[in-house]
Amino acid sequence: MEATTLIESFRVDGKVAVVTGAGSGIGRASALALAGAGAAVVCADINEETAAATAEQIVAAGGTGEGVALDVSVRGDVDALAERVLAERGGIHVWCNIAGIMVEGPFLEAREDDLDRILSVNLKGVFFGCQAAGRVMVTQAEGGSIINASSAAADAPSPNIVSYAICKAGVVQMTKSLAIEVGKKGVRVNAVAPGFVLTGMTGRYFVRPDGTVDEEMQEAVIGPMRKFTPLRKIGEPEDIAAAVLYLASDAARFMTGQVIRPNGGVAMV
Ligand code: NAP
């Protein structure tokens, strides 16, 4: 659809979007934002129930959403999802590789199986998603937009998350390299590199196994983060979803190979 005003160009009406990691946190907020702005959203997550819950919320709000179980580290499943969405919906215009995991611990004690696990989701999972989406998008007259989740951890090194950080740095380079290859086909590839955002991933520091919050621990974690951040706040998933929506939309039609950093100012690159 041709946007007639600048503000309309931020909408994504008529686009088909796939969001991985859509069952929780940033992926969920991104799926909701895209659907709210007019896209039909395929909500993919390793957790079938949470993926379905996000899709249900989209539908309840009057949008178009579908939940699917997907492990992004299984290449055949990622390819199959792209092929099915293309066959059923006639195209894929936006693909967000948001699914990710954290592995934490001192570098000198890091285990190979943990390294393999995080590489398979955070790096290979993004690779497979880019490839499956890119193959569809280069054949479409309208091209497409791929959005990958990097992290401020790729900009500002922190202790105990080296395997996570190398994945997120790899995502940045993958984004740029792919952007070069597919730009002439009208396919844009960009990344978001969030700062600290309250989600299931970061809640591991203070959410107890029964789901309750250890408020003292929460403040012990968040307090210094807030103080260290120029904007004196930590992020909410919607802060990142706003960047995802922009990159998905035609408002970002001249943006490719870029990293957008909604991070409160913790890293300025
Ligand atoms: P989150 O709340 O844990 O959401 C991640 C989602 O991905 C979860 O629903 C998770 O399912 C799912 N997932 C895990 N492994 C998967 C797989 N193999 N295939 C498909 N889905 C899988 O985390 P988040 O904070 O929203 O993180 C989203 C992305 O942003 C990640 O790539 C993360 O690295 C990045 N990021 C987050 C922050 C932050 O501060 N939160 C900062 C920078 C970057 P389960 O819950 O069932 O595992």
Image (cartoon, rainbow, N blue to C red):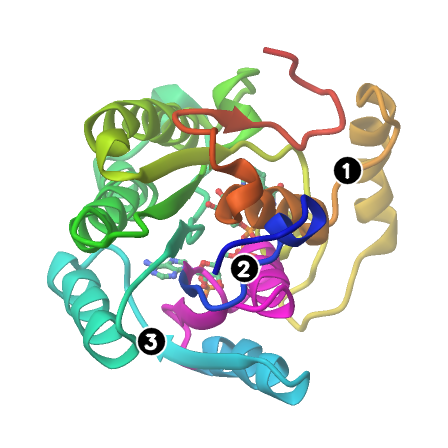
Q: Give the mark toward the camera: 3 or 1.
A: 3
Quarter of the image for the C terminus: give it.
Answer: top right
Residue 88 sits above or below residue 19 on the image: below
Amino acid identity at mark 3:
Ala
The answer to which image quadrant residue 34 occupies is bottom right
Q: Which residue is mark 3?
A: 69
Q: Residue at x 28, y 58 (%)?
A: 72
- Circle 2 sits in a helix, a strand or a loop, which is it? loop
Q: Give the mark toward the camera: 3 or 2.
A: 2
* Left or right: residue 17 compared with residue 199: left
**Mark on residue 7?**
none
* Left or right: residue 256 compared with residue 220: left
* Magenta residues (range): 19-48
| CB within 8 Å, label 3 to label 2 | no
* Left or right: residue 134 compared with residue 29: left
Whole-number angstrom distance, CA of label 1 to CA of label 2: 37 Å
- Circle 1 sits in a helix, a strand or a loop, which is it? helix
Q: Which residue is mark 1?
A: 221
Q: Residue at x 78, y 29 (%)?
A: 225
Whole-number angstrom distance, CA of label 3 to CA of label 1: 32 Å
